[in-house]
Amino acid sequence: MINPTRIVIVGGVAAGASAATKARRTNEGAEIVIFERGPYVSFANCGLPYFVGGVIKSLDDLLLVTPQLFAERYRIQVELQHEVTRIDRVERFVEVRDLQSGSSRRVAYDRLVLAPGGVPVLPPIPGIDQPGIFPLTTVPEAEGLRNWIIDTKARQGVVVGSGFIGLEAVEALLNLGLEVHLVEKLPQLLPQMDPEMALLLEAQLLQKGVKLHLGSGVVGFSGKERLDGVEISTGETLPAQVAVVAIGVRPELTLAREAGLEIGSSGGVVVDDGMRTCDPAIYACGDVAEVLNRITGKRVRLPLAGPANKEGRVAGANAAGGNRRFTGVIGTSIVKVCDLTAAKTGLGEREARDAGFDPLVSYTHPLDHAGYYPGAQVMAIKLVADRASGRVLGAQIVGPQGVDKRIDVVATAIHGNMTVEDLEGLDLAYAPPYSSAKDPVIAAGFVAANAWRQEIEISTPSDVARVVEEGKPIRLLDVRTDEEYEKGHIPGAQHIPLDKLRDSLAKVHRDGPITVYCGVGYRSYHACKILEYHGHQTRNLSGGFTSWAQAFPDRVEQGKS
Ligand code: FAD
């Protein structure tokens, strides 16, 4: 039997609530208390944007466990609107302020779990304090934002920041009928994604009527008694009666810093794999902690709900006398952007390079299920692997449906240290309404594994663009039909349809390697094999013209060959 112990938990949402209930299951004799400075415990902050937009009708649906349930079922004491203001590591107590009465008291602990999450970044931009400007991280903020839009009959809104919360806020404001401007300092949306994949989201938002201001920062919020405009670095003032500031969250380190706990280079509290800080009586978990990235071996912060819940579980178990390990993250995320889903797992191309890998990159554009079964839709997959070992390092997928299941298959493969050849061999579920006999992940595996085995050399659109930009000669061969070529092709490409290629070999350039492309890379793969047989050196353009046009929409030429 584990000795009874008093466990104090700071923060009662994702990590804190998980820690508390796991601690209870680990040690029935422990005294467990959660201090939460907000008015709610264990709420689903991930659902807040959907409440704002009216998809989730009632805030009650987002309140997952009430203090009463914590007390009755788990014998866990929850004290809402109580802020922990200091940790005394020597005497092992915390100072707690009752935010309603203003009184403070000391509460002793045997084990302390820090799960204070993050706080939204709100830079000191002139005018940021005026009514009508909201972060979107808590229940009161979401409620305030929705009520403000409805009560003031706001017609125009500005969202600042195009991360997950910013994009979800854009959709919420669209749902409420607002004209929406999205301001992003970087030149692309969703900075976690590689730029060419993020372009798909840009097209989607433009199609929905969102006004994009990429590469622009907010320099001021204007208005007399309440917001009426957002001034951006281009000199424009965007008309707005409401603004959502979603430029990130920083870890809530106040307590940890003051208590002298070690803070890592990523900006999170340093913990071991049992979520113990440098003080063995104190655990940290969730957005405040830094954890191991299983691919790079580096310590990172990954402020997402999945890791927070799992880290909380480990911290809670160990604080209660257990012996659990948190084995790290790979960085899997997903976001709905109107009619599209964008998901990422593992490393992007540049991240892989920065981590010291030589990335092998491939693109595929499969249908989410059999083309002959109604409703099939194309998704774009970018796979990143280690050229040396073939190990899968990451994937990014954007499409209207079926994205969620594919990204999780790749995430599982990364967890299992699988290679692109392993992806080829996966035995996945198939029937026409759900997938194809060659599931999108398997098809991505085929393409990447062919390249990895050097059965075929592949180039990416960026490789081709780089050669063009450097002014070096490049031979491009388009093997699509006349109709496809005329609608749009890469400038300077020679055109010979695949079905005529064997009879037109004399026309094919002989001077240097040829980059061959078709719609998505399948017909051109075949063309490469024909040309190789006849002594040509070839490269297949991965993802074909589809990937080219996604990455370089302004470098497309129309007309006959
Ligand atoms: P939090 O959930 O932030 O909880 C920390 C709590 O600690 C807060 O309630 C705070 O009031 C309390 N606290 C802080 N300091 C003190 C103190 N000194 N004393 C007492 N209490 C204190 N992640 C995903 O994976 N998928 C999503 O779709 C997703 N959507 C999101 C949408 C929104 C709008 C937001 C805001 C976040 C979203 N996230 C999502 C991120 C995810 O919610 C967080 O990563 C997760 O909640 C972090 O859990 P946590 O317990 O570390 O911190």
Image (spheres, grey):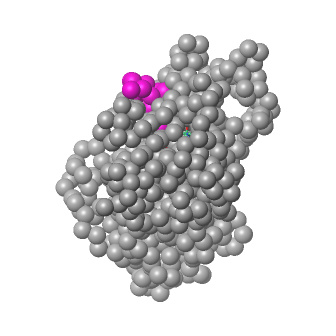
Residue located farthest toward the left when viewing the structure as drawn: 431
| Residue 206 seen anywhere in this rendered image of the structure | no
Identify which residue is drawn at 77% across, 34% down. 125
Identify which residue is drawn at 47% across, 64% down. 274
Relative placement, left or right, of 190 versus 274 is right
Identify which residue is drawn at 36% across, 37% down. 70
Residue 18: image location, x then y, percent: 41, 48
Identify which residue is drawn at 48% across, 72% down. 385
Residue 106: image location, x then y, percent: 59, 41
Residue 234 in the magenta stretch? The answer is: no
| Residue 512 seen anywhere in this rendered image of the structure | yes
Q: Main secondary structure of the magenta part?
A: helix
Residue 227: image location, x then y, percent: 70, 20
Query: Which of these two is toward me, 224 or 107?
Result: 107
Query: Which of these two is toward me, 476 or 168?
Result: 168
Residue 429 sits in which quadrant? bottom left
Query: Which of these two is toward me, 432 or 157?
Result: 157
Query: Which of these two is toward me, 234 or 227?
Result: 227
Relative placement, left or right, of 272 versus 125 is left
Residue 287: image location, x then y, percent: 55, 50
Residue 128 sits in which quadrant? top right
Residue 442 sits in which quadrant? bottom left
Please state the extent of the stretch shown in magenta in the rendering. 45-60
Q: Give the quarter of the figure containing the N terminus.
A: bottom left
Residue 48 in the magenta stretch? The answer is: yes
Q: How many marks?
A: 0
